[in-house]
């Protein structure tokens, strides 16, 4: 079936990946939106039903290219909700370790945990404890001494009542821990001090902060990767106020926006923040261009 002209003018083929990138209205999560058959629908579902066929009941369309804005039916696959969720899960942890095989641990709550990160955290913990004079206990404590070998005499013993139970703590161990975390030295619970001091963060410049949320496409558009409003325009915070990303891009790269003027997207991509694709026009000219594009 041939693609209607109204739909064909709302996406751009990307030659490298083969994606058909939707450049019209998008949802908050980056999926294309269009009013079709009298109701708002997702653009990739509309193109799939036009070119492939009806989506089976209870199935969802998965983007095999991992690009939410893509509407190419050859990049879409109808799968169950469980399979769609499984494919969306990342196979690596935040530190780059693979979450597969023996390195994957499951929490009681059903979440996933990286064993390599757990081992590294324990190694850093004991390195900090050795620095302040504690050694790793080779055996559990008994009635005479703690796990680190300190004798439980009257001077070295501290008693603590917790939920009807009388707990015993070694004062020598607590003094050694207090050198690492002075504020938490009196707590009866296990303390995990930091192994290294956090590196002070340098505040990025407005240009660096803006560039970090931009992805340059081969078609020339600079697609906004940050927060997107319901109308499809990018949002960026400046202090305690928020403004649209394309107006911020115009101010950073070109200059101040003339009073009473609006910023028109020449490329018709609302998420685009490329200054070369932006033009300051009056409200009347902006409305005229919008009407002309709808007719065209």
Image: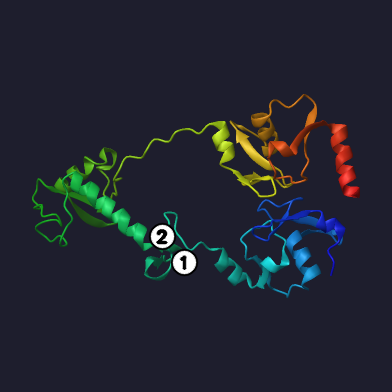
Instruction: State whether residue 174 appears in this view.
Output: no
Q: Give the residue displayed 79% in from the left and 56% down from the top.
A: 34
**Residue at the limit of the structure toward the right, as seen here:** 295
- Is residue 228 found left or right of 111 in the rendered image? right
Locate residue 226, reporting x and y percent: 61, 45
Relative to 245, is 169 above or below? below
Discs 2/1, front = 2
Q: Residues within 10 Å of mark 2 (few under 14, many from 20)?
A: some
Q: Are marks 2 and 1 in contact (CB under 8 Å)?
A: no
The residue wearing badge 2 is 97
**Residue 74 lies in quadrant:** bottom right
The residue wearing badge 1 is 110
**Of 49 and 145, which appears nearest the observer?**
49
Q: Give the residue displayed 59% in from the left and 71% down from the top.
A: 83
Relative to 202, is 157 above or below? below
**Residue 21 lies in quadrant:** bottom right
- Is residue 30 found left or right of 166 in the rendered image? right
Locate residue 109, reporting x and y percent: 45, 64
Which of marks 1 and 2 precedes in the sequence?
2
């Amino acid at each position: 079936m041939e693609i209607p002209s109204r739909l064909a003018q709302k996406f751009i083929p990307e030659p490298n990946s083969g994606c058909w990138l939707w450049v019209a209205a998008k949802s908050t999560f980056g999926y294309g939106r269009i009013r079709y058959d009298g109701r708002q629908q997702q653009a990739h579902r509309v193109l799939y039903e036009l070119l492939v066929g009806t989506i089976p009941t209870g199935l969802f369309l998965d983007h095999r290219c991992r690009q939410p804005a893509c509407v190419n039916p050859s990049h879409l696959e109808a799968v169950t909700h469980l399979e769609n969720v499984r494919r969306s899960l990342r196979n690596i942890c935040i530190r780059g370790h693979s979450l597969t095989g023996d390195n994957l641990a499951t929490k009681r709550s059903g979440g996933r945990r990286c064993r390599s990160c757990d081992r590294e955290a324990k190694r850093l913990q004991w390195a900090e404890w050795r620095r302040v004079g504690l050694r790793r206990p080779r055996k559990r404590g008994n009635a005479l001494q703690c796990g680190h070998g300190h004798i439980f005499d009257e001077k070295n013993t501290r008693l603590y009542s917790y939920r009807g139970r009388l707990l015993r703590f070694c004062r020598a161990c607590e003094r050694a821990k207090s050198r690492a975390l002075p504020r938490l030295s009196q707590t009866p619970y296990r303390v995990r001090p930091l192994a290294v001091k956090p590196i002070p963060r340098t505040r990025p410049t407005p240009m660096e902060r803006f560039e970090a949320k931009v992805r340059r496409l081969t078609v020339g558009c600079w697609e906004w990767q940050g927060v997107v409003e319901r109308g499809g325009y990018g949002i960026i915070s400046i202090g305690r106020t928020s403004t649209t990303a394309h107006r911020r891009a115009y101010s950073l790269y070109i200059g101040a926006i003339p009073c009473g003027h609006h910023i028109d997207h020449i490329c018709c991509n609302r998420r685009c923040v490329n200054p070369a694709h932006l033009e300051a026009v009056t409200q009347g000219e902006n409305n005229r261009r919008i009407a002309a594009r709808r007719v065209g």
